Every structure is written in C-alpha cells, then in structure tokens.
Amino acid sequence: MRNLDTVTLELIKGAIQSARVEMEALIERSAMSPFIREKKDYFTAFFDRDGRLVVSTALPMAAGNLIDCIFERYPRDDMRPGDLYLYNDSYGSHGAVSHNNDMVFVAPVFSDARIVAFAEAWGHLWDIGGMVPGSISPAATDVFQEGIVIPPSRVLRDGIWNEELIRTFVRNTRFPDMVRGDLSAIMAAVRLGGRRMEEIAERFGAGAVEAAFAGMLDQSERALRKAFAERVPDGRYSFRDYIDSDSVSEKSYAVAVTVEKRGETIALDYSASDDQAQGAINFIMDSSVPKTMCGLYFTGQEAGVALNGGFHRAVGEVKTRPGSIVSPREPAPLGMRSHCLTRVNSSLFGAFAKATGGNVPAASSVYVLYYLRSWNKERTELDLCIEGLAVGFGARPHADGIDAVYYVAQKNYPIEFAEMEFGVRVEGYAMHADSGGPGFHRGGCGIVRDLRVVGDEAVIGLRMDNMRWPAWGVKGGMGGGAGRIVVNPGMADERELRPMSEGNKLKKGDLVRIMTPGGGGWGSPLERAAEQVRDDVLDGFISAESAERDYGVVLSSDLTDVDAAATHARRKELARMPRGLFHRHSYFDDEELPRAAE
Amino acid sequence: MSGDLRIGVDIGGTFTDVVVRRPGSPTRIMKIPTTRSDPSLAVLEALQRMQSEWGLAPDEVARFVHGTTVATNAVLERKGAKVGVIATEGFRDVLEIGRQMRHQMYQLALDPETPTFLAPGRMRHEVPERISATGEVLKALDEAAVADAADALVAAGARAIAVVFLFSFLDDRHERRAREIILTRHPDVFVSLSSEVDPAFREYERTVVTAFDAYVKPVVDRYLANLDSGLLGASVSAPLQVMQSRGGISGSWTARLRPVRLFLSGPAAGVIGAKMAAETAGVRDLITVDVGGTSCDIALIEDGTPALRSEGLIDGYPVRVGMVDVNSIGSGGGSIAWIDVAGGLRVGPQSAGSEPGPACYGRGGMEATVTDASVVLGYLDPDYFAGGKLKLRPELAHDAVARIAGRLNLTVEQAALGIHRILNAQMAEGIRLVSIRQGHDPRRFTLLPLGGGGALHACALAEELGITRVLVPRHPGVLSAAGLLAAPIEHESSTALPRRAEDFDLGEVKHTLHGLDQRCSALMNDEKVERGAVSVRYFADVCYAGQGYHLEVPFEPDAADPFGALTAAFYAAHDRTYGHAPQAPIRLVNLRTVHTAVGLEKLQEDDWFPAAREALIRRARILLPEQQAPVEAAVYDRAALKAGDPFDGPAIVEQNDTTTLVTPGWRGRADTHGNLVLERTSN
C-alpha cells in the first residue's frame, strides 16, 4: 500500500483535514472559558502511529512533537482502544507544550487492534493555580509559581476514568467549573477526532490511511526543500533580535541565530542566544518550532501543503545551548514565552532577509496582555479580566502588514461581552495611528484600548514588549511604532506604567490607556503612492505629520489633497538620506549591539 | 379582480425561472434569460409572454412571489450604496478592527477579514453617548454631534447611514433619536439602526450586519419599487411578495425596510421547493443538494422543517441574520480540475462558469471541468445537453482531461473518474457539515438533488454517506420558483434579554414576548392576513453561563414549568449538537417570536402523465469507479417513464433540465407524481 494513487491520497487528505476542523469547531463551540471560546487559544492535530505530525492547526508557536513524551512512559504496544492521555508539563514534555496553562489530551486511534494514528488537542486553561489568578504572571521567577503540573499520564482506560487525578487538578484552580467545562470540551474533541479517524480508516482501509500519512509528509518535505533550493542562496547568515526585558529586571535578552544554507536544506544554530532569564520569558524551543516557521513561510501560500512532520525532515539540525533562553533549565519560569518565541521568528527572518536582499516580511510585534483583577470594597468578590490585545504585523514584500491582529489567530472580547462578564468598562477601541512602520508597504497598526476601572479597587498586570526594541523594518522600510501604557492621560495625575509589570494599583474611576505597538515597514516609504498615503491619513492610520516626515507627502490643510509640488520637493530632500537593509530607530545593515536600558 | 393565478419568479444568474399555477390546471414553466442590468425587465417580459403564449392575463394574478439575488449581487459586485457609520464615541474603528482575527495568516494575497469596503475610516463618525451593560444611560446623546456627523457623511456622498451604539439592544432610545435627527435634515437618506436590524450583543457582528443592511438598502429599495410599479403598470394588482433568507415570504414593503434578510432569498426558495416536492412523495426528512455551474448548495430538512442558522456568510463576511442553513461550497459542473504544488489533483473552487464554460462547450475554455469529465465518462449525451440546445464537443473534453491526466501519469479515463471522486468527496463533506456535525445521521435522510447538476452525482453521494434513497423531483431546474408558491408568510422579531438563571422572571419574559408579538401582528395585518390564519412560535437563544455561543431552542411560555422545559430542551440540543451537555446553569440571551401564516394554499403536484413513447432511448457505454472496463447502461427518457416500472442501474435518465446517473446497486422508478425514486438494492 506504499504507493497510493493520487486521487485516493487527496480523498484521505481531505477527510483528515475536515475531521481536524471538526475537532476545532467542537472545542470552540462548547468550551466554557473565554480564553478558548473567544480567543481561540487551542490546537488540534493528528499524528501518525510513530508520533509524527500529519495535520494540525497552523500555529507556528506549537511544537510538532506532542506524542513522544507519552511514549516515554507508555509504550505504544501497551496502549488500548479507548485510552486517553493528558499532560501540561512543559519541562516533562521537553517543550511539547511551552507553558503549563496548555493542557494536552491524546487518544490513540485503532484499526483492527493496531494503532494507526493519534488524535490530539490542547487548550489554554483559564487558571491552573499558581501565584496569581490566571496563573501567568510577569512577576514569576520559578515555574512552580505558574500552577499545578500534570506529567504525561493516562486518564482513561477500559472505560474507567482516573477521577482522582482530575479532581486533584481541578482542586488547584480558582475557577473549577470553568476548567472542568474546558477539560470536558477538549476531551470530547479528541474523542470525536479519534472516532472520525476510525471511520476514515474503515472507509479507505488502514493501509491506505498510513500510506496517505506518508504521502502527505513527503509532499510537505518536497515542497519546502524545493523552496529552499530556489529562494535562498547558499551561505551562512546571522541575525539577532532582542526582547525588551524579562519584567523582573531591566535587562534585554538576545535571541541569535545562524542559518546555514546548503543545497536544498538548512541548519539552524541558536546557541549564541543569551542565557536564560530570571523572569517568565524563557521558551523551551522544540526543534519543530523554527522548522514549522520556515515551512509556513516558504510554502504556506501553496494549496495542498499541510503543516506536518515533512517540514521537520526538510530542515536539518537545530542547535541550542542548554541554559540559554531558548533551552532553559528547570525551574526557570515560562508563562510569557511568546516574547521569546516572537524573537525566535524575527531573528530567523532577519537572517533570511540578509540571504535574500530583504525579500522577507518585516518584523511583527508581540501581542499584548493585561490582567485586571478588581474587587468590591469588602474584597469578597473578585473579577478577573484577562484580555489579549492586537498589535501590528510586519509589512510583506507584496502587501501592507496586517493591522490589529493577535498573533496568532485569537479573537478579542466583544466590548459588550467584556462589560457584561468582567468588572471593566471599555471607553475606546481604535487604531493606533502611526504605529505601523512607514514603508512602500506600510507596517500594520496596533490598537488603543481605554479601560475604566469600575471596581472599588483593582490591580493590573501588564505584558507588553517592543518598547525598547520595536519591530524592525526591512529593505528601506522603517521600524514599527512602540507601545505605551498610560493611566489617566491628560489629567493632573497622568502616569506611565511599565510595560512589563505586575501589581500596579488602580482606584475606582482610573482610566488605563493601552496603546499597542505596530509592525515594521517594507521598502522605502518615499515610493508609496502619495494618494495612498493621503487615504491612510483620512482613514486614521497615519498622521499628517508622519505623512510629511516619513513618507514625504505634503497634504492640504483639510487633508483631502496632495500638494504635488511640496511633496516632490520633500521626497527629493528625503531621498538624499542613506537607507540600510534594516531599520529600528535608525538604519543598519548587519547586527545591532545590545543597548543599555533607556 | 377575479383571478386565481399564482406566479413564482426566481431570478438566477443565468435564467429567470417562472412557475405559473392555477388550481385544477397543469403547472406551466417558463425560462427567460436574466436581464442583469435590470432584473425586473425579465419579470415584465414573462408577464407579456404569459399573455401572448398562454393567454393568461395579468389581472388574473392573485399572488406574485419573488425570489431575488439583487441584495447578494450588490455585495458580490460591490454595487451597494455609499455608506456612513455613526458610532458611540471611542468606537468608530470597531468595523475595522473586527475580532482582531485572521483565519489565514499565511496566504499570499491576504485581505482584511473585516468588510471595511462598506465604510472606510473617513466614512465613520463618532458621537458622545453611552448606555451601560445594565442598560442605564451613562452619557446622554449629543444631538448636535449627530447632526454634524450626518451632515458630514451626506456631504461626503453617503446615501445610507448605519447607526450603531453600544448596548443599544438594551435601550434603543439613542439610536431612534439619532434617526429622527438624520431624517429631519436629510429625508432622502436611508437609515439602518442596529437595535432594529440585529438587537443582540457583540458590537462587531451587529455593526457588520447593520452596515450591510444600509449598503444594500437603496439598491433593494429602488429595485423592488421599480418592480412594484412595473407590475402595477402591467395590471397586476396582487401585492408583490418576496422570499426572505429564513424561507418565509413577506410583503415587498417589509423587505425594503430590512433588506439584509434577503441574502439567501434564492437558495431559501430552493429549499422550500425541495421540501414541497419531497412531500408529494411522502418524504419529510431530506438533504438537498443544489448543484449549479460554480457552486453547490446543501441544506437539511427534518420532519418537514428546514434547518435554520442564526448567522451566515455573505462573500466570506459574517452576517448575523437568521437564514436557512444552506452550506454553499465551490463545487459545481464548471469547477476546474488542477494540480496543486504538492502534486495533488484538486477540483474547484475556480470555475469556468458559463463563459467560456467547460472545454466541451467549444467556446474557448481549455481547462478540464467536471462537465468535461462527465462527457469523457459517457454520462452526458453531447447531442442532448440542456435539451439539445447546446451541442457539446467530446473531443475537446477529452483533450482537456488528457492534459491533466498526463501530468499525473493517469489515463484520461482514470483522471476523469478522479475528478468525479474528488468532487463527490467535497460535496459529501459539505453534507456531513449540515448533518453529522449538527447531530443528524444522514442515513435516515433521503437525498434530493436539484439544479442542473445534482442528479449526476446523487447515487455516488448517497453511497458515500450511507444514504439508501434518492428522490429526483420532476423539474429540479425550476424548484426554486415552485418553492416560492409553497412558502408561508412569515414575520420574525427578536430582542436581547440577557438573564442568568437565577434572574428568570416569567412575567418579564411574557411581557417581552407580547411586545414582539405586537410588532409581528402589525406586519401580518399590513399584508391582510387574517389573525386566525397565523400560528405563533416562540424561541429562546440559550447558552451555558459564561459561554459565548448560543443555541436556539423552542420556548413555551404557557407550559407548566417553562424554564424547566427550556433548560431540558437546551441540554438536549447541546448534547445533540456538541456531543456533551453538563448539567450546569444556563443563561438566556435572546427571545424570538415567529409568526407564520400557513395553509394559504396546499400545493399539490400534478398527477403524472408520461409521454406516450418508448422510455428506453438507447444504450450507452459509460465508465464507473471500481470498474476496469466500460459498462453498458440503458438510457431512458424521463418524460416517458411510466409510474411504477422499475429499472436497474447502470442507467442514465435524460430530461431537458438534468441528467440522472443510476449506478449499479440502485433501482429506479417514477412515482405517481412523476418523481424519480432511486433505491439502494445491495450493499
């Protein structure tokens, strides 16, 4: 059955993709917590019998090796139909999940007493105990402050639940009903995926399904190797990008990579990255993560190529240094590993920019989160509002960056939902003008969200990066705008909050304005059509000042007309300024050195 | 007026279908090319031809029901009005930001997911006002700001204004006042209020549907007004009625007020027509598959009731308005076969459409389509396509499929079969979406193909899904027009009533429903429907406390324990839909009342009088999956099939608006109403 005909392969591929989407739909529609339901912070996948990823949610942040850690304790031959496994152990799974709020469920799929596949799903749980409600805190310095950990465990066998394990876990959360509801939704999804895969094996035959898995891996591997061969010249390319801070100190952390390209494959070396951080920005980088980033970028626009283990085979070695920020040692905290993950991505694409003369997307900002905990006077009622805020994405070689997007693929709370559910009032929600890096293609804009404290007292925790190190622009494009957080803007008691901080006290009636950072621009802003710049001004993406200063476009006083003569003169003047391959604060061509805290 | 003619007119992309019925007379059918510049012209032409060809006078028309794509086309072709939005201060960018979500982050051509074309930033203004989450007025409406915003928008060219204030579903006074101010200053501008279009929480979704309402309003208004006066000018005094997306009809005046309810006008008519045709065969549980040139619309009808959904998509954007749950996928007869970068054979969603059309049309199409594959496989008679109106060129079909086959190292026949199998798998997936994923076992259902292309794929689809019965209605090509005549008059009204279980108050709920009932009764009254003919049903949108999606469940306020029954109904619906239903507290979200006037007319399909000629036309050699060599199939003339005479597959049944492929293992027969019934005889 190794050589499956092309039509059957496509039929099986379609059926598997559709079963996976069905798992997602079930999770999204039946989960209890806003994190999963509204933010879509979950992942579904199928693996082959050896634990190789076959299809999954297109999330580059998610590792592709989710089954290996189960095999370590439960040999495949010992598994039975109906088994269900779970874990949320980042260190114990070697980074299969990269922070402990993500709970994984796995079900083996049998056909004629033989395992043909695994169905898998994880979802981000609202709260798993730990030092603060929500479990992730910018103040954490130890992974054990980030909640209860379940190592890879079997939770269901022969119809009998390991109820004690679930009870113990749920006993450790501050929101037991919600967590139970989410666990039940994720479990239901995995079991549904298992049933669907069984049906597929029955319909097409287990041999055909396994051959289809192999065929899909081959397709993805071939596509990525071809892209490397055609689009990246041979050579060694290094780049480093920086995380602003780890929130418990003011130190910036570098993620550094060297890409070595030979023929139709590449190898990656992240060992020059900085040592692990004291704060929770460490990232246990599974080797599949940068491989998936390459796969998604170089083949993602191509119909027919699935995100799977084929990508993992197309990229060679991924080297990391134990004890570094991308390979931390326990008990380094992990909660905010996205800050590191984003730099894993931007350093990788910085290196590809050097290889291709800038034909890559500019850098994107890291999403922003706040944790607003408000109480009534008696402190008997706690409201917890955890909200993820959109930022701007980097401009692309063929288009503007995406405005107002949460990387990756998570929804905001409707204001009318947030106000009914949480102790908060939203007083503004708008594009953050000028946060998109100027360029021939403009970087995406971040947003502005204004929150009024309605509880008697409140404390806010904040996670925002890209203040000291905004997203870089490329090929003449300029860096994205930084973010800011201000309490009571324009009032006598106006004050700034540190972007990575916990325990900021607020009083009833305070207004917190969160302005999120934008993405880098691509190509010289002087080449963007003047009418397009004017439209961006009219529609609120850039200010008239930035139009003149950065784009060289001078508008009439009512902003509706381009002053052609003045624009010509201004652009001519700006054209004399030398530009480099990258831009962040100023242009540069190679690597930036770390800067002292500002 | 003493007339008793009932006319249904369905305007499709290519043809305008007209069905004329008169009690006691055979149904008459007319197909006229659609006049895209002004679709009402074809309608008026139909009236003239009715008179000249059949001697039917317009003043004999008692009912005139219309299914229209004018709202949908305005969106697809971006020909709606210039729209302005007036929002609560601080929130003009809600339409732009959307849910800060992108489904496809890695597509090369990535457009925003939010419909900013409806109103870019410069066409969105803000005014001070604010209602709280509990419905109190936190900030009074700044009326001068409304006037300024309206003036600015009209000066910038706005023909319609959407007013969307936060929490207006809890208190609509600010929105209503804003409309008064706008209309006082600009009486010709169309205004859509979010509290009327979609009184439910989630401001982005409400903004989108309200802005779409405003966008199509001037277009729909002009179109229906033209048609109205055209009918009057042609001496039709019957009121113009229009099919709405939920499958009920309303007077054109109501439709003009709320045009966003017309997006699925055409497909809804098809679903109702299918339901009606199935009922003549005693079938009440069916899945309909409407296969046209570019797409395939799938719907499910259980116990005679079409499945509805509370939110649908128009051109990929979410539109939160009730509609028949039609799953539309990009698979049709014109779908193009191609090879993806991974070397896989794919079919659609690109389509050759009708111009140039499939390669075998001989109009310059070079790419292999599903229709070309059908010709290669011998399913379509090149001399009898579309009743012989279009002569197909099999050599061009063969060449086109051969080009695909060569790249895949397949024979032409293998490639043609592959194209069919992939298309069938896509359609089967589409059927699973409306059946299995909604908790329905498709094996309980009868498959009903409609449109020109459905019957060719019906047996294969049925087998893939374990369905054992297929019903091919007599005129699958004009079922939508026929459905218009069978649809009930329906008015629906809903309101948000967010309440936790502990705050349920029957008095409040009944009071709210009473208010909704009054609105619907007024509309029924406008259409001169007698009170006694109206049946009233209540529904509640319910979710678990803290959950963001809701399910619609029936609600009976006069039951012994209404909230207990509601809770039980919700648990059952949740279990059926999602496979689990914890006994957790529920929450009320919206209340809805639906007034339906049924029994206006019980439509009976005419008895079947087969043509007096031999049914067996010839024998053809066709290729089927799982068979190495061509097999011989009997080819029958649908019009000459006698009721009850069975025949076995492989067979082909030809008629001028479709071709039915009966595969081995299936037995067919015509029933006494002329339906073609196919049943599985072996496994």
Image (spheres, coloured by chain):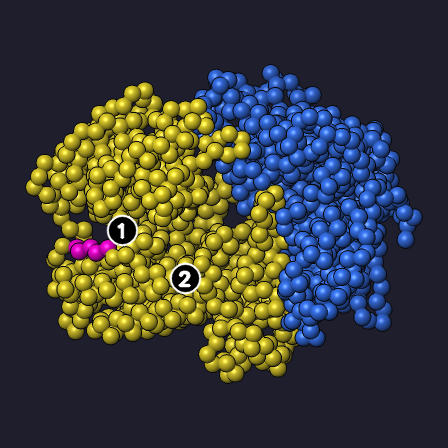
Chain colours: A blue, B yellow
Instruction: Specify the principal SS of the magenta part.
Output: strand
Compared across the picture, whether A251 is left or right of B517 comes to right
Pick the front one: A544 or A508:
A544
In this rendering, is residue B397 above or below A71? Answer: below
Residue pictured at 77% horizontal, 46% vertical = A581
Q: Amino acid at mark 2?
A: Ala
Name the residue carrying label 1. B479
Pick the front one: A549 or B100:
A549
In this rendering, is residue B256 above or below B112? Answer: below
* Residue B545 in sight here: no
In this rendering, is residue A81 above or below A396? Answer: above
* Residue B331 in sight here: yes
Q: Amino acid at mark 1?
A: Leu
For marks 1 and 2, give the CA distance: 21 Å
Q: Which residues are magenta?
A: B27-31
Residue pictured at 39% horizontal, 70% vertical = B221
- Quarter assignment of residue B392: top left
Pick the front one: A362 or A277:
A362
Name the residue carrying label 2. B71
Q: Which residue of the protein is positioned furthest toward the right in this rendering?
A: A596
- Quarter assignment of residue A203: top left
| Picture coordinates of residue B282, whole percent (x, y) | 23, 44
